Image (tube, rainbow, N blue to C red):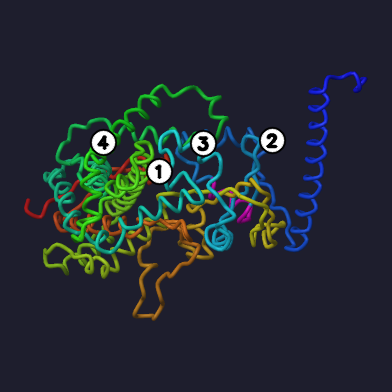
């Protein structure tokens, strides 16, 4: 090719292309040298591959297996078995062509979530999956945007807000009234999700949906749950999810959910002038309402809606799932029911205060044990923002440090980690609240776990609503024990996982309760 005869623009384009190619080659060489130096410095070794798949190019066989397991409601169970069968605590897998490191090492999670948290982000797939429904909020952003969301949310969870027992009682009393008093079968799970919806909307919007006192559903709960299932798959499979058949309900559900929250956004914006005036006055502010603070800061409707949806997801689903899982077990365990009743009897029929709830050690142990065996968020992941290392997982026995390149994904199973017998004993698979309690007879201390117990994450991204969720679950449990003297399980099935963005028993919590005044 005679370059001298080429037009000037073509010559310039060719020259730039050559410069770019040389630059890329130089950058790759530099990156390669830096990575080799980091690996030598830290003494890293590659993690072993998971032994149970054959396709080392795309990982399609494992993908198909996982899809089947999700439909069979057995994914968490089988992932736990994979760690046990391979005899390792960190391994590599391929999913749709992407290499993923999977770990249940607490020291790795400590580094990811706390020590080197700035080196790790949510990852492109999670943002791709969650944003169509949730927009930009605390669960879909990193960096400055995440800090801003967290700072706005923090005042919701000060001591005066978390301990607002009066607000809890308003909604829990409606829950008690909604339960049949003639030993008819009731699915407490459905009522728990209504309860947390009512309390979360009052907490965030300043007014409740009152779904417990208005049994006729407006369809929001169903649309919100289906939407979570859909975006969960988007986050798992990324853009490959476009290869699956379209979900005909998704577009309708997304619009329905957005319109539901937009109603409150408009109501909040309508009182913005008044709120700004109140903030500039010397009067003592009233109860903190999240949407009020949002509309003081911005009139961007999409941003306000997104922040509200992010927190509504957490406020509704996590606590309702915890209550469902706990009461599913309580109904099948007369020993646990008797001990709860004995502890609650110490209140002499009075409504519990926030301080009294904190002092109920057995109740706390039951909730801790439920969160251990049935964590509401059973799996999680982070994506490396730069080349970095983890302290464990490399080499055949997993004792060497592990190199993770920029863009590498590390996932972990809280569900499997919470069943490690080296931390929780040979009975780690059993529901035993006593493991959390001190034993005066032997002097043995109850569990005081560290990073091996992560129902609410850790580090800077630790769940801000942790105490709120535990307080609401504790108060609800106490009030049900006060209102009903006997319980009977009406579900013969074992606990079975149902995964969307959170995890709850597939069959809910079907029980029969006998009222004390019956």
The one nearer the camera, 321 or 366, is 321
Report the mark closest to the observer, 1 or 4. 4
The quarter in which the N terminus is drawn is: top right
Report the mark closest to the observer, 2 or 1. 2
Q: Answer yes or no: is residue 88 visible.
A: yes
Which residue is at a point 18% across and 49% down the rendered structure image? Answer: 171
Q: Earlier in the sequence, mark 1 or mark 4?
A: 4
Can you identify the residue that label 3 sits on?
128
Tell me the SS state at disc 2.
loop
Q: Are marks 2 and 3 in contact (CB under 8 Å)?
A: no
Can you identify the residue that label 1 sits on?
496
Tell me the SS state at disc 4.
helix
Q: Specify the quadrant of the image occupied by residue 372.
A: bottom left
Residue 286: within the magenta? no
Tell me the SS state at disc 3.
helix
Report the mark closest to the observer, 3 or 4. 4
Which residue is at a point 79% across and 23% down the rendered structure image? Answer: 9
Report the mark closest to the observer, 2 or 3. 3
Tell me the SS state at disc 1.
loop
User: Which label sits on residue 266?
Assistant: 4
Which residue is at a point 72% across and 63% down the rendered structure image? Answer: 42
Q: Earlier in the sequence, mark 3 or mark 4?
A: 3
Q: Which residues are magenta?
A: 79-90
Task: Give me the C-alpha separation between circle 2 and circle 4.
Answer: 52 Å
Q: Position of residue 90 (x, y in %)?
A: 62, 54
Report the mark closest to the observer, 2 or 4. 4
Q: Earlier in the sequence, mark 2 or mark 4?
A: 2
């Amino acid at each position: 090719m005679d370059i001298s005869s080429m037009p000037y623009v073509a010559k310039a384009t060719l020259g730039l292309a050559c410069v770019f190619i040389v630059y890329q080659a130089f950058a790759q060489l530099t990156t390669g040298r830096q990575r080799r130096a980091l690996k030598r410095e830290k003494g890293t070794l590659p993690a072993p591959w998971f032994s149970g798949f054959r396709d080392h190019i795309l990982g399609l066989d494992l993908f198909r297996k996982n899809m089947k397991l999700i439909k069979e409601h057995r994914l968490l169970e089988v992932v736990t078995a994979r760690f046990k069968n391979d005899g390792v605590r960190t391994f590599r897998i391929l999913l749709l062509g992407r290499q993923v490191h999977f770990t249940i090492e607490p020291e790795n999670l400590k580094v990811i979530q706390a020590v080197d948290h700035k080196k790790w982000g949510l990852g492109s797939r999670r943002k791709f999956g969650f944003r169509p429904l949730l927009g930009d909020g605390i669960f879909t952003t990193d960096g400055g945007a995440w800090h801003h969301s967290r700072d706005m949310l923090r005042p919701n969870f000060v001591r005066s807000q978390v301990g607002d027992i009066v607000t809890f009682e308003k909604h829990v009393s409606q829950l008690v009234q909604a339960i049949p008093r003639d030993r008819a079968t009731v699915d407490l799970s459905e009522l728990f999700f209504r309860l947390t919806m009512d309390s979360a909307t009052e907490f965030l919007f300043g007014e409740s949906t009152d779904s417990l006192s208005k049994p006729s559903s407006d369809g929001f709960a169903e649309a919100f749950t289906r939407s979570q299932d859909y975006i969960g798959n988007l986050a798992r499979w990324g853009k490959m999810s476009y290869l699956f058949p379209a979900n005909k309900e998704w577009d309708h559900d997304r619009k329905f959910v957005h319109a539901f929250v937009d109603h409150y956004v408009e109501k909040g914006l309508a009182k913005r002038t008044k709120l700004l005036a109140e903030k500039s006055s010397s009067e003592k502010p009233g109860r903190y309402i999240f949407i009020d603070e949002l509309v003081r800061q911005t009139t961007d409707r999409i941003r306000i809606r997104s922040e509200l949806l992010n927190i509504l997801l957490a406020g509704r689903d996590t606590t309702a799932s915890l209550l469902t899982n706990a009461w599913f077990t309580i109904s099948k365990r007369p020993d646990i029911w008797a001990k709860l009743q004995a502890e609650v009897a110490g209140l002499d029929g009075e409504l519990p205060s926030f301080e009294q709830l904190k002092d109920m050690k057995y109740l706390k142990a039951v909730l801790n044990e439920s969160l251990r065996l049935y964590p509401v968020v059973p799996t999680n992941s982070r994506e490396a923002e730069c080349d970095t290392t983890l302290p464990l997982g490399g080499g055949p026995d997993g004792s060497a440090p592990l190199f993770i390149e920029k863009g590498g994904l590390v996932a972990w199973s809280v569900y499997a980690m919470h069943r490690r017998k080296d931390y929780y004993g040979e009975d780690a698979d059993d529901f035993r609240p006593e493991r959390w309690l001190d034993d005066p007879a032997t002097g043995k201390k109850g569990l005081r776990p560290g990073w091996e117990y992560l129902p609410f994450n850790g580090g800077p991204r630790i769940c801000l609503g942790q105490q709120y969720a535990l307080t609401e679950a504790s108060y609800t449990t106490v009030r049900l024990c006060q209102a009903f003297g006997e319980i009977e399980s009406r579900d013969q099935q074992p606990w079975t996982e149902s995964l969307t963005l959170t995890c709850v028993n597939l069959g809910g919590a079907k029980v029969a309760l006998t009222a004390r005044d019956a």
